[in-house]
Image (tube, helix red, strand yellow):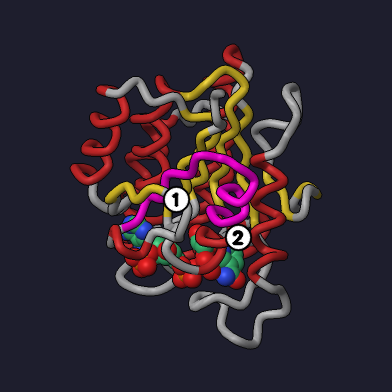
Amino acid sequence: MTMNTALITGASRGIGRQVALTLAAEGWRVLSGVREPASAPPGTEAEALDVADASSIEAPAARFRARQQRLDVLVNNAGVYEGPAHRIWDTNTLGPLRLTRALEPLLAAHARVVLVTSSLGRLSAQPASFVERLSDSRLSLDDLERLAREAPGGYGESKAALIVMARLFAEQLKPRGILVNAISPGWVRTDMGGPGAPRSVEQGAASILWGVRLEPGGPSGGAFEDGIAMP
Ligand SMILES: NC(=O)c1ccc[n+]([C@@H]2O[C@H](COP(=O)([O-])OP(=O)(O)OC[C@H]3O[C@@H](n4cnc5c(N)ncnc54)[C@H](OP(=O)(O)O)[C@@H]3O)[C@@H](O)[C@H]2O)c1
């Protein structure tokens, strides 16, 4: 029997952990991209991965290539809210860009890729000059990588860049039937969201899992929360 395989980054805690546990309970083979192998949730396989570190991304990518690992799902969930701007962009934006690029040859036909964004990343919430840069119709993934290296802003901007990234990867991977979307979990009670957030971890994970479970031919290149296009 071939099991569906998913790689979830930031699976040690919070929303990523809940997504990993849910898929594992459904019989998926779940690879947990975690900084500390002991923090991988039960029923999943730890893959040591610091998404903010380019060399740490290359190691699992090389391992996967060597064993011809097929991936049906990639959830770029690892993220940080605070800290120096370069740390935020390396983790939230460059990490998903590098990891998706490195693993793209291993994605199965009709695979689903999720970039976990935030309502704070919606384009309408960003400074006009930044929106102008992101909205350039000629912008490529290489341009986006250069922009991310500048770390132009904080958390919201880093998540806005993911929305554009989803569109660019979606275009590139369309011939293979691969669906790529930026998905917000809503404001969720995790270490990041805090105890006052209105949504449970399960609700946040459900929003992400919508993008994992899309039918072939489903939406791609968009930004969604709870399956609804973000404003
Ligand atoms: N919570 C919310 O209200 C909310 C709202 C909108 C969007 N989001 C987004 O949802 C995602 C998950 O958030 P959360 O609330 O579950 O956050 P969380 O509870 O703070 O967990 C963050 C996860 O990311 C991992 N991580 C951080 N930096 C990493 C790195 N360099 N390499 C690998 N893993 C790293 C952490 O691993 P360690 O255990 O090793 O630190 C942890 O597993 C994030 O992308 C976040 O921006 C959250």
The crowding category of the residue bearing disc 2, from other C-alpha atoms within 10 Å (few below 14, some 14 to 19, many at least 20), is many
Q: Residue at x 64, y 40 (%)?
A: 212
Residue 215 in picture, x, y percent from top left? 75, 29
Towards the viewer: 129 or 220 = 220
Q: Amino acid at mark 1?
A: Thr
User: In this rendering, is residue 124 above or below 66?
Assistant: below
Residue where numbered disc 2 is placed: 118
Mark 2 close to ligand 1, CB under 8 Å:
yes
Residue 175 in picture, x, y percent from top left? 59, 12
The crowding category of the residue bearing disc 1, from other C-alpha atoms within 10 Å (few below 14, some 14 to 19, many at least 20), is many
Residue 225 as seen in the image, left or right of residue 31 = right
Q: Quadrant of residue 3?
A: top right
Q: Say which quadrant the N terminus sits in.
A: top right
Residue bounds of the magenta highlight: 19-34
Q: Are marks 2 and 1 in contact (CB under 8 Å)?
A: no
Residue where numbered disc 1 is placed: 44
Determine the residue located farthest toward the bottom in the rendered image. 196
Q: Residue at x 71, y 56 (%)?
A: 206
Q: Quadrant of residue 213?
A: top right
